[in-house]
Amino acid sequence: MHENRRTTDSDSVVADSPIVVAALYRFVRLPDHESLRPRLEQLLAESAVRGSLLLAAEGINGTIAGSREGIDTVLAELRSIPEFAELDVKESRCAKQPFRRMRVRLKREIVTMGVDGIDPNQSAGTYVDPEQWNDLISDPDVLLIDTRNDYEISIGTFEGATNPGTESFRQFPEYVQQHLDPERHKKVAMFCTGGIRCEKSTALLKQQGFQEVYHLRGGILKYLETIPESQSMWNGDCFVFDQRVSVGHGLTEGGHVMCYACGWPVSEQDQRHPDYEPGVHCPKCKDQISQEQRERFAQRQAMWEKQGRDRPMRPRDESD
């Protein structure tokens, strides 16, 4: 069971926090997605909402943050677009704006797998609600796979989950080819942060002949929001793609920070390690960076501190 939740922040504090964070996506045919970019850029700017939205011919993906009014305005406008009427949205809260800027990006895929012909609208796994997830993954015949990347899994995952050891979602098809077999793996359950990567990963498995394929509806975020900690099979925190870095049960903000040298999350324990220097290196990467990099990172950190600036965002997003 989860043992790392900090008890100093209550759920009521989270609920009352002024910033709403909305993770959203929708797989839908969107051949004219380029034309939506100016409209969405104006909408985010006028609503004082920051974050990023990704547009591609296969749909929309993104995480945005702002006031309750601002987020409601953006979501209402998005849902007024017929293709986004059934937009999948998961919300959480935080005390301060977790994004420095707003951007709308055009991409080939809203979550990058790199395999042609994968359409979650045509073939995907069976949704399992958080309330039924524990029963499913407790079945000894079910192979449970965490479809996220190594840096995400390092801080938390479900009991008994298989780590594919991927550095990016682009590597997941190769993992499937090398390690999974529809004749041996009769039941496969998969999960990710908000559900979008599992839409594609289950569609991939269905395309390759796997019969019983399941995925967690709403992803880890919905599970942590819905399932009481006393009944949870989740261990650790969940990595999120904003300045909070991680969240725990009840979607309370975690204690991790980002290492801006290697891009890995740093736990509270490792933040007390002698090999951790904010903005410069962490215990994982201290011996992997050069002296020139160390000096450059230290100068950058000193500049941020002198100017009182927030650190820049990590070079990652859930599209990878």
Image: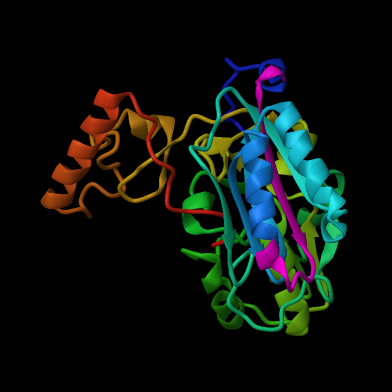
Q: Is residue 300 visible?
A: yes
Asked whether residue 109 is drawn in magenta, I would say: no
- Judging depth in this view, the residue of 173 and 51 nearest the camera is 51
Where residue 297 sits: x, y (%)?
22, 43
Compared with 30, 47 (above or below) is: above
- Residue at 76% over, 69% down: 30
Residue 304, image quadrant: top left
- Residue at 73% over, 28% down: 68
Q: Is residue 253 left or right of residue 76?
A: left
Q: Is residue 102 left or right of residue 46?
A: left
Compared with 309, 201 (above or below) is: below
- Judging depth in this view, the residue of 138 and 226 nearest the camera is 226
Compared with 231, 40 (above or below) is: below
Residue 269, image quadrant: top left
Magenta stretch in the rendered image? 16-35
Question: Which quarter of the rendered picture does the C terminus lie within?
Answer: bottom right
Question: Which quarter of the rendered picture does the N terminus lie within?
Answer: top right
Where residue 42 sits: x, y (%)?
65, 46
Q: Is residue 160 visible?
A: no
Where residue 24 sits: x, y (%)?
72, 49
- Residue at 48% over, 49% down: 154
Q: Is residue 79 left or right of residue 235?
A: right
Where residue 58 sits: x, y (%)?
72, 70
